[in-house]
Structures are given as C-alpha cells and as structure tokens.
C-alpha cells in the first residue's frame, strides 16, 4: 500500500469503507440510541463526518445548519421533515455512549490493518508517540482541564502513530497528565495490550525522561527510543565503539555508543520534615548514543534505548522519522477542525477526537 498524498476525499469515498450495515449493527449492540428521538448514533456519526469534510470551521451552530440542510438529508436518506437545534446536538454529544464510536474506529482500523502484507507491516513498526494541546477559556470548559494559569485550560490529545494510521488515541484533562512522563507511557501500554504480538519500537521526544519509566519498559519488553536531555547522569559499563569503527550517521557525527546504567532523582523527607533530592542508580542496562551535528558541532543529540541489536544509524534514522507525528497533528488541526473544541464536555470532546481519527483512517492509500 503506497503512502497517500494529495488525495481528495469525498463522502462517497468514506461510505465505501464505513458501510451502513456496520453502523446499524453497532446501534443494535450498544446503548447508543437509548432515549434518543432524532439524533440516533448513525445520524450523529454521519453528521460529524460530513461536518468535518464540508465546514471550514466546525461548531455546534454549523452542525445544526448542516443537519437541517435538505442536501445533507437527501445524501444520507434522512427524513426531510426532521430537524435539530444546536442545544440538542450539544446535549447528545455530552451523553452519547462512547463504545459506539470506539467500535467504529477499531473496525475501520482493523479493516485497514488486514490489507497490509507482513513485509509491508514491517515498514510501520516505528510507533511515534506524542501529544498535542487544544486550549479553551477556563470559564467555558466543562471538564477539569490542564490549567495554564493564563485564563485558559487545555485538553491533551495523546496518540500513537505508525506513519500511516493513528491507532491508540487518548484524551487527557487532568493536571497529572500534563506531564508526558505520565501520559505517553499510558498510551504505549494501552496499544501494547491491543497488539500483543507486536514488533514495534516506540519513538519518543524529550517529554519522557523518567528512568523509572524506562526501567519499567525494559521489564515489560517494550522497545523504545527516546531523545534524552543532554548531560544526564549515568555510569558507562561498556563501549560499542572500537578503533576500527566507521559509522556514518549522515548529517551527524557519532561521539558515543555504549551500555550504561542511569541515575534517577528520588524525593526524600528528612527527620526535620524537609524535602530533598537523592540520586539513585538503576542497575538496568540501557544503550546511550550521543551524536553531534557535522554543520553545528555545538549541537548534541542524546538517545537512550533498550534495543542493543539495531545499529547506531538505524536508531538515529528511526528518531528522525518521529517528525511524522508532528505533521499528523498539523494535518488534523488544519484540515479536520481539531484546533478548537466543538464540545466543551469531556464525553463530546472524546467523541469528536475519535471521529477525526476515524476519518484519517479512511483516507485512501
């Protein structure tokens, strides 16, 4: 399957991979339509999908106008006499059963997954994991939100992306998940549960620095490559660079490739009640790769991984491909109306997040 680019996707293209029979089946096997008179699950799904495609800026008002448009009703064979108001859409988003959208998403993802040959799947075993924030005025957001102390709060979208499709998608609103050391490991472990026979390598930026998390990943046999903060403390156990080594990293120059033990900082409380940091050595082997730019020798790049089989070039090349997820976030914000919140209720935000990534799964390859 070739990587898509510059595809023009219409509603008919999407209907081809999300058949009505699937939506009807899920409607019967979930609680999505309990107490719903007009906006049944199938209708709301089509409304959101069509709204994302047809509106430059998605809002509850534009969704109201879309549903009441005779062209929309004709396209999806809805009763022309039916109508909805913005308040009804808002209430429906806040209460609709989340399992309905989750199962649509997983069915579509699985449909695409089986289209890949085993050799093709190997191209997509580098899983980029990162987050993007969407902010809203704190007095209007109806969820806890991550407080920025500037009159706004944010919700965090954290995703695992294989370069073609997003798979694991989580929405975080608690202050605890403001830390990537908390949010991203949760996303990774959730994907590992879904993909038990995986051969994935998880690529992370400098948001994840916890030696404890890295130790847990090693214990759980989760391969990772993370860009570390420069000059973090470690003990070198063994160097993999020899006098005959001649490693070409392209635009980088290899300075160090070695097995190390990492230190971590732990909080301690003294007898007098004061808190201080103590450095603790984790005697768990990791691999540290340090390189610097050939054109900018003052710029160093530190990478920590638990993979000892890949070459230094393969590891640095894998990290370069992490940028794909940044392009993906840019795409969904610019093209799928994900740069603002259509619903201010957590349930509604989650549903729209799932709709957006389902749409991305449906893009033809």
Image (cartoon, rainbow, N blue to C red):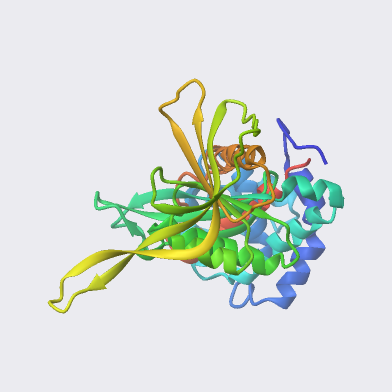
Which of the 4 image quadrants contains residue 100?
Answer: bottom right
Instruction: Name the residue nearer the viewer: 331 or 288.
Output: 288
Task: Give residue 323's position: percent from left, percent from top.
Answer: 57, 38
Specify whether residue 149 is in view: yes
Residue at 70% x, 44% y: name it: 164
* Rendered view: 37 above or below 164: below
Q: Is residue 52 above or below residue 27?
A: above
Left/right placement of residue 311 relative to residue 181 reads right
- Identify the residue at image location x=57%, y=25%: 251
Q: Nearer the viewer, residue 347 or 4?
A: 4
Tell me which residue sits at (70%, 50%) in the image. Answer: 361
Q: Give percent across and percent down for residue 295.
A: 49, 20
Q: Image check: 21 left or right of 329?
A: right
Question: In this view of the protein, which residue sits in the foreground, 336 or 178?
Answer: 178
Q: Nearer the viewer, residue 224 or 187?
A: 224
Q: How many marks?
A: 0
Q: Quadrant of the N terminus?
A: top right
The answer to which image quadrant residue 113 occupies is bottom right
- Quadrant in which the C terminus appears: top right
Q: Is residue 78 left or right of residue 170?
A: right
The furthest residue to the left: 272
Outermost residue to the front: 243
Furthest residue toward top: 295
Asked whether residue 210 appears in the rendered view, the answer is no
Q: How far from the left and from the top, in percent, is residue 84?
A: 55, 59
Q: Position of residue 181 (x, y in %)?
A: 44, 59
């Amino acid at each position: 399957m070739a990587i898509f680019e510059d595809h023009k996707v219409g509603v008919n293209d999407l209907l081809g991979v999300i058949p009505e029979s699937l939506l009807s089946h899920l409607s019967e096997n979930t609680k999505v339509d309990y107490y719903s008179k007009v906006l049944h699950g199938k209708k709301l799904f089509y409304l959101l999908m069509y709204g994302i495609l047809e509106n430059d800026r998605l809002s509850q008002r534009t969704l109201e106008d879309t549903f009441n448009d005779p062209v929309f009703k004709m396209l999806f064979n809805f009763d022309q006499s039916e109508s909805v108001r913005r308040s009804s859409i808002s209430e429906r988003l806040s209460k609709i059963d989340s399992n309905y959208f989750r199962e649509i998403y997983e069915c579509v993802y699985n449909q695409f997954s089986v289209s890949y040959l085993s050799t093709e799947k190997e191209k997509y075993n580098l899983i980029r994991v990162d987050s993007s924030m969407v902010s809203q005025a704190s007095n209007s957001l109806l969820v806890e939100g991550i407080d920025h102390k500037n009159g706004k709060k944010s919700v965090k979208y954290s995703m695992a992306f294989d370069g073609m499709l997003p798979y694991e998608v989580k929405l975080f609103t608690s202050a605890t998940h403001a830390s990537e050391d908390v949010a991203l490991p949760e996303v990774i472990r959730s994907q590992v549960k879904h993909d038990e026979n995986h051969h994935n390598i998880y690529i992370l930026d400098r948001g994840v620095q916890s030696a404890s998390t890295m130790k847990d990943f090693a214990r759980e046999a989760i391969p990772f490559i993370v860009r570390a903060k420069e000059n973090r403390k470690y003990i070198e156990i063994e160097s993999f660079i020899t006098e005959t080594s001649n490693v070409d990293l392209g635009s980088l120059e290899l300075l160090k490739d070695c097995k190390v033990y990492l230190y971590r900082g732990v909080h301690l409380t003294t007898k007098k009640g004061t808190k201080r940091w103590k450095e603790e050595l984790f005697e768990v082997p990791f691999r540290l790769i340090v390189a610097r730019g050939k054109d900018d020798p003052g710029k160093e790049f530190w990478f920590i991984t638990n993979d000892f089989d890949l070459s230094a070039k393969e590891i640095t090349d894998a990290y370069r491909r992490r940028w794909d997820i940044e392009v993906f976030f840019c795409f969904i914000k610019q093209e799928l109306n994900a740069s603002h919140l259509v619903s201010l209720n957590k349930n509604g935000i989650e549903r729209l997040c799932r709709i957006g990534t389902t749409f991305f799964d449906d893009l033809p390859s």
